[in-house]
Amino acid sequence: MKKRLKILLPCIAILLLLATALVLLGRLVEPKYLTEQKEGGLVRDYYKETSSHDVLFVGDCEVYENFTPATLYRDYGITSYIRGSAQQLVWQSYYLLEEMLKTETPKVVVYNVLALKYGEPQNEAYNRMTLDGMKNSLTKWRAVLASMTDEESFASYVLPLLRFHDRFGQLKGEDLTAIFDRPTVSYKGYLMQTGVEGGVSDREGIPLTDYTLPERSMEYLEKMRLTCEEHGVELILIKSPTNHWKYYWYDEWDEQVKDYAASHGLTYYNFIPLCEEIGIDWNTDTYDKGAHLNVYGAEKLTVYFGKLLQETHNFDDRREDETIKTEWNALVDAYQAAKGKEK
Amino acid sequence: MQVSSAIFVLFLALTILLYYLLPKKWQWGLLLVASYCFYLSQGVQYIGFLLYTTVVTFVTGILLSRRAEREDAFVEAHRGDWNKEERKAFRAKEKKARFRILLAGLILGFGLLAVLKYTAFAATTVQSVLSWFGDAKIKIPSLLLPLGLSFYTFQSMGYLIDLYRKKSKAEKNFFKFALFVSFFPQIIQGPISRFGDLSEQLTKPHAFSRDDFCAGLFRVAYGFFKKLVVADTAMIGVRYLYAHTDTMRGVYVVLLIFLYSAEIYGDFTGGIDITLGVARMMGIRLAENFNRPFSSQSVKEYWRRWHITMGTWFTDYVFYPLSVSNGMQKFSTWSRKHLGNAVGKRLPVYFATIVTWFLTGLWHGAGWNFIVWGLLNCFAILFSQELMPLWNAFGKHFAKLSASKFFYCFRAARTFLLMGLFRSLDVYKDVPLTFSLWSSMVTRWNWGELFSASGLTSFGMSTWQIGVMLFGVLCIVIATNLGKKTPLWDRLATKPVLCVSLVACLVILILTLGSYGIGYDAADFIYGQF
């Protein structure tokens, strides 16, 4: 027995060392998204939050580039966070929401409906940007299984080294410095875009053969609604403004979302026809010819939406809340500074 | 299920776990089920061909065996009343009858291989010939080519020939025989085993042996290292050079020779290491297929060290029978009489060698490039054989130089380059194109291009990938030299802690440096396609 243990124990130790080495190597080669493709760092930023929020935004680029929590706090005293990432699919939003509701109970969850058009996993790169940032949990593994494209493997999400091993030849300084701790890339989930490249789309969306929103995405929307209901949180559906044919929001889709919201007693705001009222100028308030808003457009939309929220939900003004004041004022300052600097 | 995939590793782990957990009498049954599951995972459509070969060989084997048993019993019964001549005459008659059974089995067995593998090639060749005389259009059939077909066909036909020669006894249990044909680690790319060496090992119970398990585990990990770090990385460059033959000439042909040598060595020896390692983990020893081939001093020696089981198959079942056949004896007598002793005694050997190498080429693939490759090997062997007196004289005059390390390295390098040159036919495929590329090595003197600042990354590989490949090659060179007398895995068999440590290191190297996953073309083993 002693002889066996003499062999077994070192072997177990070696295997543990191997596992540790593989995890550390995975962390080393994983893209950090600190200076390029910052969208990939958004999901991870959430884990640095220390206090809960009044409003949680969930969705794709139409939330993380179009709403600014700093403005919502500065102007209305509403605390909020955006859990969005590039082309974040409905099921990814659902699992991210499920994860957040484990630790906090906001008053309102705002979901942007653009991704309802996708009924199937789309793109490996976007999947990685959303899912790699999530902490290991059953929720994450379910999100991975729901999101994987055919070329992807589950193992590569468990062990990122399997996916990013070819980055060894391209490692940069930030890969080394950010192995254990990564600085945030966003302002409470908002990714600031200060550039201006205006433009008004001169074409409409390409006609489709079938305008029915995919069953799978509607299923996950329903799951999201039920989860919110279970936690006593109000779910608000929105459609962010856009003025680009690539992100065209068809009337037929809008009708289906309207019907869904009406049948479940949800509030739905489509901001596309309200652009003038909001004050969005497509020559100055977009950084990519109308696809997304820049910080100036995002502020206008946030001010408008904040007013709506305040009127309908009577949020407490948190600007005088001593427990969070320092943190949020620092955020507003940093946000303003960055906005001014970029300008 | 690719052998170099994570799913195969899981499949393997589960099979080995069950292998030792189940009662020993069920072990071979489990191997049979696992083998068929593995083969089914390669494509359901292939299974019929495997079953066909198994059934044909099994039935022929039983018929051969019964005939031989009856013959022996008959001779035994007439021991007292037959004289030597009568017994000889009866045996000769029976041999002819058994030969007819063997022939039927060979035709049915090789027939499938011929139809599936060579019909399209034959049709294309006929069309090319007919096109010389005018517009000829033949429908080129597109047939399925089951994975490992050449390997399991040769293994099965070898079994029949051994039975005919009464070198082994027929397997009476169909399922045990099916396991011999389909044993999963080796079905895709060999080694080509002999029934007498393998069958008993497969079906006898195996108790867990820590030593065998350790040796096998290390060998599997080392095989994956060769395949994923060296072969699949070198493949990136090889594919690029092959796809750009219009510009990648001259020195790039030399580069291809080196890169493809690294690729095929890592791929084939790596695959065989995985196969032999897996079998060893289950207590089964398969025949070795390589013995440091790149240290060979001549082409002939190279073929004694590279793909050994195929070489011995052709020697035992083609070259020797052909050399001693009645026809060849007559030809020998005729040629000595008409062409003199010197030429006459050589001709039959030459003829048998050419036929053997023609078939070796054809075995590797249905294409003229493979046939030309086989014949070039043949001519290199015959040529060096003819030059032997000259070499011997050189050795006598320059005894010190001949025995020096430098001369040893020179001969090894010469053999390596020659083999690499021939092997490039496998990559370029087109024979005239290959010859023109060979000539460009002399006519287009562009060495400066390759060794310029941008030259090293001009052939599809990044400097990182080149570095990884060279590191992998260096590891193999070191490991090969360490295992010169006793292979590394045998040395590690009794040192489990060291073995597990090295396996852990190999796993880290494979996962960090290997060419796999998204962005890489998952490559099947090259010999799996033969």
Image: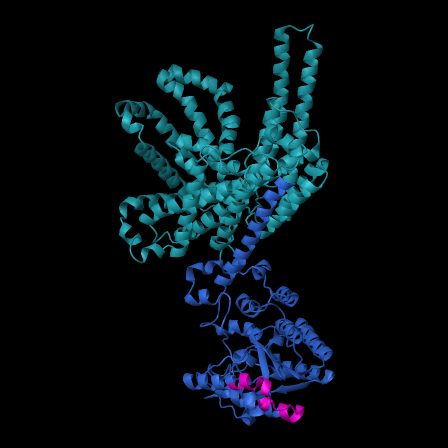
Chain colours: A blue, B cyan
What secondary structure is the magenta-colored segment mainly? helix
Q: Which residue is depicted at the point 67% across and 90% down? A: A313
> Which x, y percent locates residue B251?
31, 48
Q: Which residue is depicted at the point 72% across and 81% down? A: A232
Q: Is residue B321 above or below residue A30?
A: above
Q: Is residue A300 magenta?
A: no
> Which x, y percent locates residue B54?
65, 36
Q: Is residue B272 left or right of residue B46?
A: left
**Front in this rendered view, residue A39 or A124:** A39
Could you tell me if residue B106 is visible in this image?
Answer: no
Q: Quadrant of the C terminus of chain A?
A: bottom left
> Which x, y percent locates residue B141?
55, 46
How many numbered discs sit on the rendered protein? 0
Q: Is residue B135 above or below residue A240?
A: above
> Which x, y percent locates residue B62?
68, 27
Q: Quadrant of the N terminus of chain A?
A: top right
Bounds of the magenta span?
A309-329
Q: Is residue A324 above or below residue A44?
A: below
